[in-house]
Amino acid sequence: RLARYPYLRVIFSSAAGVDHITRDLDLPRGVPIVRMASEETAQTVGEYVCLAALSILRDGKRLAAAQAAACWDSFELPHTALDKRIGVMGLGNIGQVAARMLRGLGFTVAGWARSRRELDGVEVHSCASGLDDLLARSDILVGLLPETPQTRGLIDRDRIRRLPRGAGIVNAGRGSLIVMPDLIAALDEGHLGAAFLDVFDPEPLPSDHAAWRHPRITITSHVAGFASRRSRARSVAAALAAHESGGPLPNLYRADRGY
């Protein structure tokens, strides 16, 4: 539909991702695309990541099962956030907010990014060897990466094996990051302890998919991050004002990066 607008100057995505726009074969070339990067989106994804990490830490699946069975299951766990390490893959605006929130809960947090950067209290890794280092020290791995040719299938059997035995995985970025059969196999074998997943490939996740019934997987329906219409309108209005006054457009999609 975008090809119908001959005077199109800027395209604003209503989401952090733009793949729903760039897959349009008739997309006008050379028109800048602005990704949505509102404070509300970062806040809600950060909240989701904390919820998932705490659920893995405190065995939320067991708590839910006890209520469903009307069973008084009182138990103690051997760990707190203070002695658990979390690795965050993706340290853009959303990843940085999530990392700060996890640190606030007491987790030791490290991150992996495309390029080297500084983030207070967070050890930042980059490049392929940096990813291996991050995996080896992550009791919980959080995926917040965009979908690019380099990230599709990045978390496969070999990389899952580099995580400590019993580790958990949280994915709130893109479903294509994880090779699902490899993830399920690692859970069945006991190498992974839990997975908390909000994104899938394809979506919606088919009702007959094995992940729905897996005892160590928690599934949510792509609800991790959202922003109100008011928040999105403010972001677009601010970007338009900056653009009209000759300033640079924020959060531009770059085809060479894929996000």
Image (tube, rainbow, N blue to C red):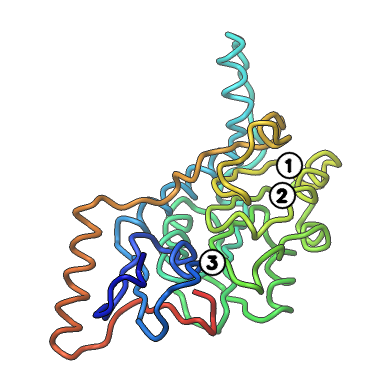
| Mark found first going from the N terminus, 1 or 2 | 2
Dots 1, 2 in contact, CB < 8 A: yes
Q: Cα distance, mark 2 to mark 3?
A: 22 Å
- The crowding category of the residue bearing disc 1, from other C-alpha atoms within 10 Å (few below 14, some 14 to 19, many at least 20), is many
Looking at the image, how many numbered discs can be counted on the residues? 3
Q: Work out whether 179 lies above or below 184.
A: below
Q: Cα distance, mark 3 to mark 1?
A: 25 Å
Q: Position of residue 143 (x, y in %)?
A: 58, 59
Label 1's element?
strand
Residue 104 occupies quadrant:
bottom left
Q: Work out whether 38 lies above or below 205.
A: below
Q: Mark 1 sits on what residue?
A: 193
Q: Mark 2 sits on what residue?
A: 167
64 relative to 138 in the view: left or right: left
Residue 63 occupies quadrant:
top right
Q: Position of residue 180 (x, y in %)?
A: 73, 49
Q: Cα distance, mark 1 to mark 2?
A: 5 Å
171 relative to 8 in the view: left or right: right
Residue 121 visible within the image: no
Tag 3: amino acid? Pro
Q: Position of residue 6 (x, y in %)?
A: 28, 78
Q: Residue at x 46, y 82 (%)?
A: 254
Q: Residue at x 72, y 32 (%)?
A: 214
71 relative to 226 in the view: left or right: right
Q: Mark 3 sits on what residue?
A: 146
- The crowding category of the residue bearing disc 2, from other C-alpha atoms within 10 Å (few below 14, some 14 to 19, many at least 20), is many
Residue in front for this viewpoint, 201 or 195:
201
Tag 2: amino acid? Ala
Q: Work out whether 97 lies above or below 185.
A: below
